[in-house]
């Protein structure tokens, strides 16, 4: 099978698209990749962005028409209009699948969803809401880990000093996150992420400097004694974020806010720990800081579960099986 992976950036950033490329190639498929965003001033220019995006999309259509893939796998593609998806299908003759890692009700226009042959999302709430109004191309697909990518490197002494902290959190600032950490501001928490300069002054002592990307992100998932995970209240309603699986893959001891899907992915109390409010989070932090052997057992069990049940290869197999079971999702559909 020929597969075209359409990722936000190519070469990949933070593994976006690289994970699917590796999984497809491991199964013997021929893969080509293309990005639909750019990291340059022209892409960020408000007056020129729409024209530049049009030029990028024409390039994607040209590559699809020339190579004729059997499968086009779009990673998020929140800006792709219905007309572009239809044009992509006409140009390639391929089955078009979207793997949307956020809540589509929150972060993409409604009319961008239905044109796909298969639209995969981690958010059960969104699937129920969209099916209620008649959409039939939806598939529940949780996020995943990629063990060959999602693993911590050997830290340097400087990196160990920076990341081997009592409690770590990696994520961007949102006011709700700031409000949560105000309840825990007396604890030895260190925060890595963008936008925290906008946080209340009472949190400034928790900030650990520049955001953690790439190598440093995986160190922030593995070296703290406790890794906090705090989901977005609109982006993760019932579903869980990709960090849940990446932290587990890195062998971190994870304490996350409760979501219905957490218990579907991991066994609470044995492979992961959850809290329902800041008071319970504080109690669990104090307990597990005092019991390193329990932390180690839960972290190791969570890593085994992530590598056994939640890899990108398993998610790819599920997509391909779902396509085989759906009428009309074969090459040549117009």
Image (cartoon, helix red, strand yellow):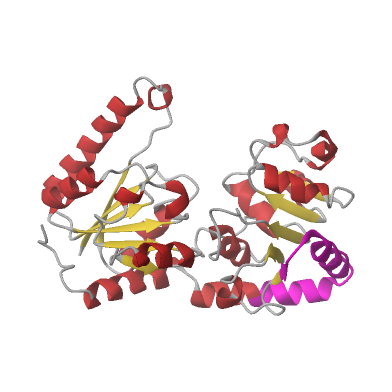
Q: Is residue 210 left or right of residue 56?
A: right
Q: Is residue 327 left or right of residue 270?
A: left
Q: Is residue 189 above or below residue 313?
A: above
Task: Point out the residue furthest to the front here.
Answer: 133
Is residue 297 shown in magenta? yes
The quadrant of the picture occupied by the N terminus is: bottom left
Residue 6: x %, y % from top left: 31, 49
Residue 247 shows up from this direction: yes
Q: How many marks?
A: 0
Q: Is residue 113 above or below residue 307?
A: above
Q: Is residue 156 above or below residue 276?
A: above
Residue 220: x %, y % from top left: 68, 52
Residue drawn at the location 18% of the way across and 60% of the way down? 70
Residue 138: x %, y % from top left: 33, 66
Is residue 143 shown in magenta? no
Which is the main secondary structure of the residues drawn in magenta?
helix
Tell me the quarter of the picture where residue 2 sits: bottom left
The quadrant of the picture occupied by the C terminus is: bottom left
Q: Is residue 230 above or below residue 38?
A: below
Residue 50: x %, y % from top left: 31, 28
Closest to the observer: 3 or 125? 125
Closest to the observer: 164 or 312? 312
Magenta segment? 274-301
Residue drawn at the location 71% of the way across and 69% of the way down? 274
Residue 160 shows up from this direction: no
Q: Is residue 91 left or right of residue 147?
A: left
């Amino acid at each position: 099978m020929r597969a075209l992976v359409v990722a936000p950036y190519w070469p990949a950033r933070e593994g976006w698209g690289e994970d699917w490329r590796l999984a497809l190639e491991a199964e013997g498929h021929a893969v080509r990749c293309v990005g639909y965003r750019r990291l340059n001033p022209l892409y960020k220019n408000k007056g020129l962005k729409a024209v530049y995006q049009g030029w990028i999309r024409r390039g994607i259509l040209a590559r699809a028409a020339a190579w004729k893939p059997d499968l086009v796998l779009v990673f998020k593609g929140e800006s792709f209009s219905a007309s572009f998806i239809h044009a992509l299908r006409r140009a390639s003759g391929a089955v078009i699948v979207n793997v949307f890692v956020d809540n589509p009700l929150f972060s993409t226009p409604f009319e961008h969803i239905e044109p796909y042959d298969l639209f995969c999302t981690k958010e059960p709430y969104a699937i129920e809401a969209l099916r209620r109004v008649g959409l039939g191309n939806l598939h529940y697909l949780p996020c995943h880990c990629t063990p060959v990518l999602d693993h911590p490197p050997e830290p340097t002494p400087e990196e160990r000093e920076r990341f081997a902290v009592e409690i770590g959190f990696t994520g961007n600032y949102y006011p709700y996150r700031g409000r949560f950490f105000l309840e825990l501001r007396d604890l030895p928490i260190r925060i890595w992420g963008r936008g925290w300069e906008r946080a209340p002054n009472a949190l400034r002592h928790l900030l650990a400097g520049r955001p953690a990307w790439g190598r440093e992100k995986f160190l922030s998932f593995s070296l703290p004694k406790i890794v906090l995970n705090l989901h977005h209240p609109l982006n993760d309603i019932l579903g869980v974020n990709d960090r849940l699986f990446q932290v587990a893959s890195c062998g971190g001891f994870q304490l996350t806010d409760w979501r219905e899907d957490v218990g579907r992915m991991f066994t609470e109390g044995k492979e992961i720990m959850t809290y329902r409010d800041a008071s319970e989070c504080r109690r669990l932090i104090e307990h597990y800081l005092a019991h390193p052997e329990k932390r180690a057992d839960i972290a190791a069990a969570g890593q085994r579960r992530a590598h056994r049940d939640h890899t990108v290869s398993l998610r790819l197999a599920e997509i391909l099986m779902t396509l085989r079971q759906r009428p009309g999702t074969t090459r040549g559909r117009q």
